[in-house]
Amino acid sequence: MAVTTKRIQDLPSAGTPAVGDFIPTAQLLDGITRHMTVSQILALATAANINTINPRAFDAKIKYGVKADGVQFTDGSITSGQATFTSTTINFVAGDVGKLILMNGAGASGAPLSTTISAVNGHTCTLAANAGTTVSSAGIGYYGTDDTAAWNTAIADMVTRGGGGLFCYGITMNGGALTQFTNANAQHINSQIVIPYTIPFASDKVVIEIFGPYSDGFFPTIGQTAPQSGGLVFLSTLVGQSHSNTYGNPSMIGGPTLTASTQPTYTYYSNVFLRLQNVRFRCPSNPTLAAVNLNGVQQVALRGVMADTTDAYANIATVPTNPTGLGIMMPYVNNNDRCYIDECSAYGYYGGIGIGEHTSGTNLTAAKCNAGLFMLNKTMGHGALLGYVSVESNPYCLAGIDVVSGVESLPAQIAPLVIQMLDIENATGAFGPVDHVLDANNAFYGFITYLLSKSSLGPSVGPLSNSGCGNLRFLDAMRAGSGFVTG
């Protein structure tokens, strides 16, 4: 079929374009700002299956069958030892049978319950597994179609096409098993959604972008009792995962991983460059897998990305305990340079945001993690430059530790680290600080300007509580003229 190029301003009505019409990007943007609303553009694309962006950018729902039909509920109830789930706001239909369902606190010992729907009856449904804990009337959870296979197909096709973009919106649920394999270059994969480690020609590099309709990097309000779920939300239902000595740290989405037998070299990395924009990645409470593992991706750019959990920020009362539960992990040593992270957040993970070498960024927030910001300091020779970083309610606000199992034997490398403003907001109780900054190996040199606040948010004069940090210099932003001090 011949492709007819049309300008949006020449379209007299929403029904004018025909199937196969192609509207160039610049004219699309012009149409959004001058002639048509975003909802009109999306309606056209859905109704006529028009590629409204460019020949290599697709709506993942239309092109690859991603459903993204996940539903969040806040009124679920179930009794321990039984499989009948009830929600007064949900009217289950026959098509819901077989869908994934995850409910906070309903598993054994209060862990999340992850299973599928086996039968439906109005406001109740029968689950494929019994609850291990009773949850009454206010249970938070999610149900929807498993999109794991569709996303893997979409990303693999983007690689075959030489790169491109995938747009989506809604809650896209992922309950598929971890893909685990090792290739001839000793690259290991341990992820539900795989960032491919190779492409048809070894010398090629391709760029893939996954993006939602608007930024999802905004941090929730402190009193928010249900997670925000607008935009594009990737949600994993996997629980009870553990580190594999063969395949590395498990993740919802990721490329090559690190293990004891693989130290990163140029051949170790994926040939796919990745851009994530306006996306939220959500794992079950007290996660046992990483939301986003980019350790083995050569070059990345993240903007407007959040790693959160299926429970709301205000409901998290204990420090995460699973070392495999990591929010966002940036590329490791020997990456392809110029990795960027901006307007990104994480909460509820053992490690919030992991920073490697060749990385710059700003507007980062990490809260209610064991280590809010963790630096991959043992192999971070070329360092990192960060602008504004906010850390709140973390026993370790900034930790120079390697949480990736299997590489602890590597010697610490001296690495430059500069943080222009480290905003530390203390907490009391379970999340009270053990050390504000932990650098036990004295592996970093550089400087950090910091603001240390009490739980009441009033400024304090410090000092920071540090371990190591012998080569770092600190400047208290509230004590003008005090000069730099050592750790």
Image: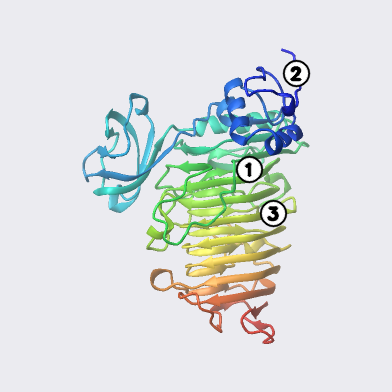
Asked where in the image residue 475 lies, by quadrant, the reply is: bottom right
The label on residue 340 is 3
The amino acid type, in three-letter code, at marker 1 is Ala
Q: Secondary structure at mark 3?
A: strand
The amino acid type, in three-letter code, at marker 2 is Thr
CA distance for labels 3 and 2: 38 Å
Instruction: Tell me, yes or no, whether the two marked residues, 3 and 2, touch with CB atoms within 8 Å.
Output: no
Image x and y of residue 433, in percent: 47, 73
Q: Is residue 354 left or right of residue 67?
A: right
3 or 2: tag closer to the N-terminus: 2
Q: Quadrant of the C terminus?
A: bottom right
Asked where in the image residue 53 lies, by quadrant, the reply is: top right
Find disc 1 in the rendering and name its residue.
186
CA distance for labels 3 and 1: 27 Å
Query: Total marks drawn?
Result: 3
Which is more foreground, mark 3 or mark 2?
Answer: 2
Find disc 2 in the rendering and name its residue.
4
The amino acid type, in three-letter code, at marker 3 is Tyr
Residue 456 drawn above or below residue 12: below
CA distance for labels 1 and 2: 47 Å
Q: Secondary structure at mark 1?
A: loop
The label on residue 283 is none
Q: Is residue 122 left or right of residue 112?
A: left
Name the one closer to the observer, 146 or 108.
146
Image x and y of residue 403, in percent: 54, 60
